[in-house]
Image (spheres, rainbow, N blue to C red):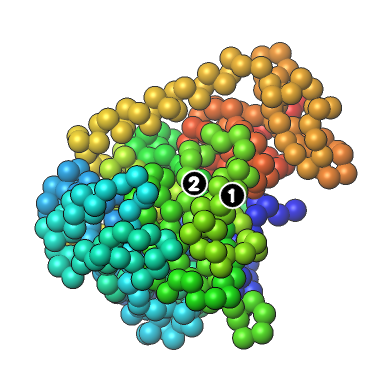
Amino acid sequence: MTREKTTSCWMATAPRPAHAPLTRDAHADVCVVGAGIAGLTTAYLLAGAGTSVTVLDAVGVGGGQTERTTAHLANAIDDRFYEMERLHGADGARLAGESHAAAIDRIEAITRTENIACGFERLDGYLFLAPDHERGLLQREYDACLRAGLIDVQLVDSLPAPTLSTGPALRFPRQGQFHPLEYLYGLADALGKKGGRIFGDTQVKRIDGGRPARIQTDRGPALTCSHVVVATNTPVNDLVTIHTKQAAYRSYVVAAPITNATIPKGLYWDTDDPYHYVRLQNLPSGPGGRQYLIVGGEDHKTGQEADPEERFRRLEAWTRERLPGFGAAEYKWSGQVMETIDGLAFIGRNPGDEPNVYVATGDSGMGMTHGTIAGMLLSDLILGRDNPWTSLYDPSRKTLRAAGEYTRENLNVAWQYTDWLTQGEVASADQVRADSGAIVRRGLTKIAVYRDSQGKPHERSATCPHLGCVVQWNAAEKTWDCPCHGSRFDRLGEVICGPAVSNLAPVE
């Protein structure tokens, strides 16, 4: 049974690297939890400096959100440079642009050094106006870009893809794109050659900092180390602190082959909220490969959408309206985006924890560059080297100008607990359709009922084991999603992603 229903277009030419689970106690200088881009980049850079590194992952290399990205590599900040300037000051905005540009440079350097055939290429990115937005918004962002040091950004009169928009746009040169799984598989291979170890199918159940730190796994063996890096999209070692400063959102993606040259290669984003993002990718599907148009958007908070299929329909309609060459979507998927209250990731020492425990989270829609920044910054912190981005990405930072967003997001979380006062979605398990799920109330408890394609019901507690919210059925992915902090479980209640580290409880 698959963990999620929808399948992304990122099918690598080689199968996922096979890494056996951890079967006995072990030790390393650094333990990295999570084999996505943040975890593997950190491990790769540390191993290159002569540090012994072990990576643990519940699935394997790229098995989490990295294989659900659209892999835009950009230093054009999603939340705008004028917002970075407001929230983090002029120096913070400058460092944000500098760090994301450095991340693209580092990805390019690694692909060349390690001969990773992931289709990395440089290309222009374009920010264009949503239909009801005016040119002044672009002018404001253009001025902020110049103040942040992006002196090669241009305000142009039109896009090279006029069907997307006939109005002005901002052109960001030297952005990038690649095949994320091909890159990650190559990075894992390079890590192995440097002596790093990767263990797949190994669920981490508990992380204790200190000297030494200790990581307990679900299979029994434990790993001790001098430093721990938790790079699991959202921290599985933190109960509250980080989760009050970021929120989980689902972002939707459709992809279809393009047979006519309706749009030049490039990265494209509009100013809508939520915004749309577009790019092309050559994929090895069919003889000689085909060029696919990849379009994303329609974001909403995880667990707070009753009809996710409607999001796909709206996304396809938006695309066909602007790009007539877009046919039936061959791939449809969604991914989890952790949006922080101030638009930048949390990378550094875990607040309130032992000083040898580090986290990388809060991708804010820029997971590939934020993940690479995490590798660069965390390896410097662990090796005792200065890094100019330390304060900007410090997980303990308090961004006072983001207080309004902090309040809004946490009031939203508090409201989700009122689900305990409502009736179930259906009166009994008998009313749950085949290959679907629904919440049923029984007395004071709520039950998550999934009925499989053969008609057999499977029941679990609907209480998220993280902080007790009622999970919701995701009809697109066939998962149970927590509307409070984004924990997700497969249709049978097994945990897919944190912050929860245990399954939905059995029903007695």
Q: Tell me if mark 2 has few (under 14), some (14-19) or many (20+) residues whose alpha carbon lies within 10 angstroms of its own.
A: many
Residue name at image x 38 percent, y 84 percent: 112
Q: Tell me if mark 1 has few (under 14), some (14-19) or many (20+) residues whose alpha carbon lies within 10 angstroms of its own.
A: many
Q: Is residue 497 above or below residue 32?
A: above
Residue name at image x 84 percent, y 27 percent: 430
- State the SS at label 2: strand
Tag 2: amino acid: Glu
- State the SS at label 1: helix
Which residue extends farthest right?
A: 454
Tag 1: amino acid: Phe
* Residue 201 visible in rendering: no
Q: CA distance from mark 1 to mark 2?
A: 8 Å
Q: Which mark is residue 312?
A: 1
Q: Is residue 478 above or below residue 138?
A: above
Q: How many marks?
A: 2
Q: Which mark is residue 215?
A: none
Residue name at image x 69 percent, y 24 percent: 425
Circle 2 sits on which residue? Answer: 298
Callouts 1 and 2 close, C-beta under 8 Å: yes
Q: Is residue 108 left or right of residue 278?
A: left
Q: Is residue 395 above or below residue 69?
A: above
Q: Is residue 212 left or right of residue 503?
A: left
Q: Quadrant of residue 47?
A: bottom left
Q: Is residue 137 above or below residue 110?
A: above
Residue name at image x 54 percent, y 27 percent: 468
